[in-house]
């Protein structure tokens, strides 16, 4: 399919003579937008290297696209590629071994993928929404049919975190996974911190630069990160996909004041995807089903921590294993070719599958073989225990505000690590605060010890109702030390 006169014969590798290679892996692709076009370019540019690593060539032989003229332009006159506007033609194509679903969405994409599986084809996708919503059905269908579903590009694209959990860390009992897994929100938070912007201004900047969609809801409301955290949890803990039970909060309501106050306290705010094993009341050998935490929300991270240094649109994931300790994975979290890097890696894995096709010889889709999976409960957010950051806005000059806040938290049984009165600084070095409203408010800043989420929320509601104390609603963010 690919005839590149500039490709060095040595790029295939001396250990594998081209004549000794088996027939190429034949790929059908549904969608040739950002992900599909990137996959085409990477395969074309690095065909020799990829074949040398896979032990066989990888050829795209069929492409389904809504806009055939645009698809033909992307393919740039390549011969031997069948173009169609019918995705089901690719999913059922007798000359296709593996279908790359690169169209996105959770409706038609589900039907295309299940059809491909029913026709005995392996599937590669970077569609995290599809797998978070329909993953259990898709993985079960693939298991029954004896084909593979690969999805490295669905989580943190260029970072091979699924492979790390399924293969590199397979000896470990995973205790927790935490990550910055949405590049759009990380860019917005970086701009809010570095430029002092409010959320709306930072979002508009992200949209202007192409980091955020015109409708940014999936990103800024935490849904995209929750899709990815769900897949991480399933692979880390050997459980089914449980997106519907995830706790999801975004950054839409985050205030610039809290970004600045977090810096004052030695923290930075990141949107984190968290999956944590809840200690079981058992012998500790992991034989009894355990609950897990599955949550996405903004959180304060110590400024000195490596995760706090991940800025712009970059992603990073931490994994805590009992044998390996804490490991960190960093890389681009979005983009055409970073995603294509993961898609092609999945294609290489499919190309390497045992010739007998025995599913028992493959890495399981969710790290654990089906008989070893456990249906672990997701802990309700109210029962999750973390440290907390509280900001209680009080009237400027209120002499006993700190004592009142401390007293009410003590009555609620919430331990306090630090508590201080903070005044909004003047803007741009001026002698006065930025606005008259700022001048009328001080902020009691609190860092608590570990407490249940519902316990802290109830204490804040009581604080808000104390006569003459709060001039605005108190703010609460969770704190993750990631130790």
Image (tube, helix red, strand yellow):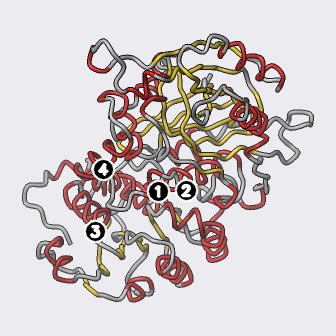
Q: Is residue 155 above or below residue 176?
A: below
Is 403 displayed left or right of 150 in the figure?
Answer: right
- Looking at marks 1 and 2 on the same chain, the residue that comes earlier in the sequence is marked by 1
Q: Earlier in the sequence, mark 4 or mark 1?
A: 1
Tell me where residue 206 appears, x and y as whole percent.
29, 47
Give the residue number, with chain letter if any, for mark 1.
154
Position of 137 with respect to 328 (left or right) is: right
Disc 3 designates what residue? Answer: 33
User: What residue sits 50% from the left and 23% below the top?
Assistant: 441
Question: Answer yes or no: do the residues labelled 2 and 4 have beta carbons within 8 Å?
Answer: no
**Distance (Cα) linking label 4 and label 3:** 16 Å
Q: Which residue is mark 2?
A: 227
Q: Are marks 1 and 2 in contact (CB under 8 Å)?
A: yes
* Label located before the other in sequence (2 or 3): 3
- Where residue 251 appears, as percent x and y from the top left, is 48, 44
Mark in the foreground, 4 or 1: 4
* Real-space CA distance between mark 4 and mark 1, rounded to the nearest whole angstrom: 17 Å
Question: What residue is at 39 percent from the left and 26 percent from the top?
Answer: 436
How many labels were placed on the picture? 4
**Residue where numbered disc 4 is placed:** 211
Q: Quadrant of the C terminus?
A: top right
Marks 2 and 3, how far apart at CA: 21 Å
When the figure is inspected, residue 156 is found, relative to residue 223, above or below; the finding is: above
x, y percent for residue 121: 49, 77
Q: CA distance from mark 2 to mark 4?
A: 18 Å
Name which quarter of the figure residue 389 lies in. top right
Q: Quadrant of residue 400?
A: top right
Label 1 vs label 2, nearer the camera: 2
- First in sequence, mark 4 or 3: give its number: 3
Q: Tag 4, which secondary structure?
A: loop
């Amino acid at each position: 399919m690919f005839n590149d006169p500039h490709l060095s014969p040595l790029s295939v590798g001396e250990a594998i003579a081209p004549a000794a290679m088996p027939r190429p892996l034949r790929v059908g692709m549904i969608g040739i937008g950002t992900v599909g076009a990137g996959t085409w370019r990477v395969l074309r540019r690095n065909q020799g290297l990829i074949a040398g690593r896979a032990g066989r060539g990888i050829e795209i032989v069929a492409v389904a696209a809504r806009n055939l003229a645009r698809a033909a332009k992307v393919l740039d006159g390549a011969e031997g590629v069948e173009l169609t506007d019918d995705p089901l033609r690719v999913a059922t194509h007798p000359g296709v071994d593996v279908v790359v679903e690169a169209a996105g969405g959770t409706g038609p994409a589900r039907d295309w993928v299940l059809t491909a599986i029913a026709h005995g084809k392996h599937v590669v996708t970077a569609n995290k929404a599809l797998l978070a919503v329909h993953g259990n059905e898709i993985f079960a269908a693939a298991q029954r049919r004896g084909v593979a579903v690969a999805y490295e590009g669905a989580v943190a694209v260029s970072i091979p975190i699924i492979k790390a959990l399924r293969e590199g860390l397979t000896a470990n009992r995973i205790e927790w996974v935490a990550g910055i897994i949405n590049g759009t929100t990380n860019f917005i938070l970086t701009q809010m911190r570095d430029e002092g912007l409010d959320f709306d201004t930072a979002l508009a900047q992200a949209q202007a630069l192409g980091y955020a969609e015109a409708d940014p809801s999936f990103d800024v409301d935490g849904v995209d990160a929750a899709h990815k955290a769900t897949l991480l949890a399933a692979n880390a803990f050997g459980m089914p996909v449980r997106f519907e039970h995830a706790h999801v909060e975004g950054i839409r309501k985050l205030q610039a004041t809290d970004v600045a106050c977090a810096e004052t306290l030695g923290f930075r705010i990141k949107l984190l995807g968290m999956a944590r094993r809840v200690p079981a009341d058992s012998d500790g050998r992991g034989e009894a089903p355990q609950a897990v935490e599955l949550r996405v929300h903004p959180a304060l991270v110590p400024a000195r921590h490596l995760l706090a240094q991940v800025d712009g649109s970059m992603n990073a994931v931490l994994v805590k294993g009992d044998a390996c300790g804490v490991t960190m994975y960093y890389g681009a979290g979005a983009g055409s070719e970073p995603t294509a890097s993961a898609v092609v890696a999945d294609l290489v894995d499919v190309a390497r599958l045992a010739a007998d096709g025995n599913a028992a010889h493959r890495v399981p889709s969710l790290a654990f073989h089906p008989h070893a999976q456990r249906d672990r409960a997701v802990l309700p957010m109210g029962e999750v225990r973390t440290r907390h950051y509280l900001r209680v806005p009080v009237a400027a000059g209120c002499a006993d505000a700190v004592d009142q806040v401390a007293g009410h938290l003590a009555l609620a049984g919430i331990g306090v690590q630090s508590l201080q009165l903070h005044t909004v600084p003047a803007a741009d070095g001026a002698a006065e605060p930025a606005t008259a409203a700022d001048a009328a408010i001080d902020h009691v800043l609190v860092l608590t010890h570990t407490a249940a989420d519902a316990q802290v929320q109830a204490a804040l509601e009581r604080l808000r109702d104390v006569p003459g104390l709060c001039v605005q609603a108190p703010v609460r963010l969770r704190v993750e030390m990631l130790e």
